[in-house]
Amino acid sequence: MKLIILDRDGVINEDSDAYIKSVEEFIPLPGSLEAIARLKQAGYTVAVATNQSGIARGFYDEATLAAMHDKLARLLAEKGGAIDYIAYCPHGPDDNCDCRKPMPGLLQQIQQHFAVDLTGVPVVGDSLRDLQSARTMGARPILVKTGKGRRTLEKGEGLEGVPVYDDLAAVVNSLLEEN
């Protein structure tokens, strides 16, 4: 199985320090839906691992999150794409869960769901915690400059050996050239 794992906010859709709290605020980044469609057409299984602490903080509920993901599915279907599995953490930073990135719980859920080893699997994120989570599982961390990616790059910590791309479309171009 050719698997890829994507962070959501800042990789697939616009991110906000004030959180993505509604379906209306869920706006795909330019080229991201087409990139996911290209992955699917190339035989990839696409999973999403996303921290959604806005639920714990009371900014939105799980029904709203589901509606955002329904919108994503609809928009992807129009482009010939799909997400095969979404793992999300609804907890806040002080909840001491094992699923909030940089902890490995979301990636472990994806690993169990597909019954695969994540060693070498590309994990695309825009923050250090995405990269740390990938490393914990032996996956292949990739940073994009969208979302919080430029900020992550400026800090420069924990980026040793991590390839950096402008956006998800650039990552997909590179992966498809490799294969």
Image (spheres, rainbow, N blue to C red):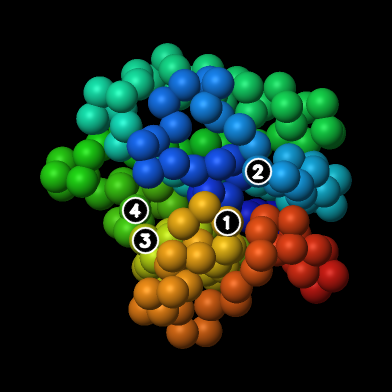
Q: In this figure, which residue is indicated by the disc labeled 1?
A: 146
Task: Tell whether 90 sits left or right of 46.
Answer: left
User: Which amino acid type is marked by label 1?
Assistant: Thr
Residue 179: numbered disc: none
Q: Are marks 3 and 1 in contact (CB under 8 Å)?
A: no
Q: Residue at x 52, y 36 (%)?
A: 86
Alpha carbon distance from label 3 to label 1: 15 Å
Q: In this figure, which residue is indicated by the disc labeled 4?
A: 101
Q: Which residue is at the front of the view, 57 or 81?
A: 57
Q: Are marks 4 and 3 in contact (CB under 8 Å)?
A: yes
The quadrant of the image that shows the N terminus is: bottom right
- Count residues near mark 4 (Cα–Cα under 10 Å), then give few for <14, some for 14-19, many for 20+: many
Camera-near label (2 vs 3) is 2
Alpha carbon distance from label 4 to label 2: 22 Å
User: Which amino acid type is marked by label 3?
Assistant: Arg
User: Which amino acid type is marked by label 4?
Assistant: Lys
Residue 29: numbered disc: 2
Question: Which x, y percent locates residue 38?
Answer: 82, 48
Question: Which x, y percent locates residue 13?
Answer: 59, 40
- Residue 137 visible in the current orientation: no
Task: Tell whether 107 sits left or right of 104.
Answer: right
Residue 129: numbered disc: 3
Alpha carbon distance from label 4 to label 3: 6 Å
User: Which amino acid type is marked by label 2?
Assistant: Leu
Alpha carbon distance from label 1 to label 2: 8 Å
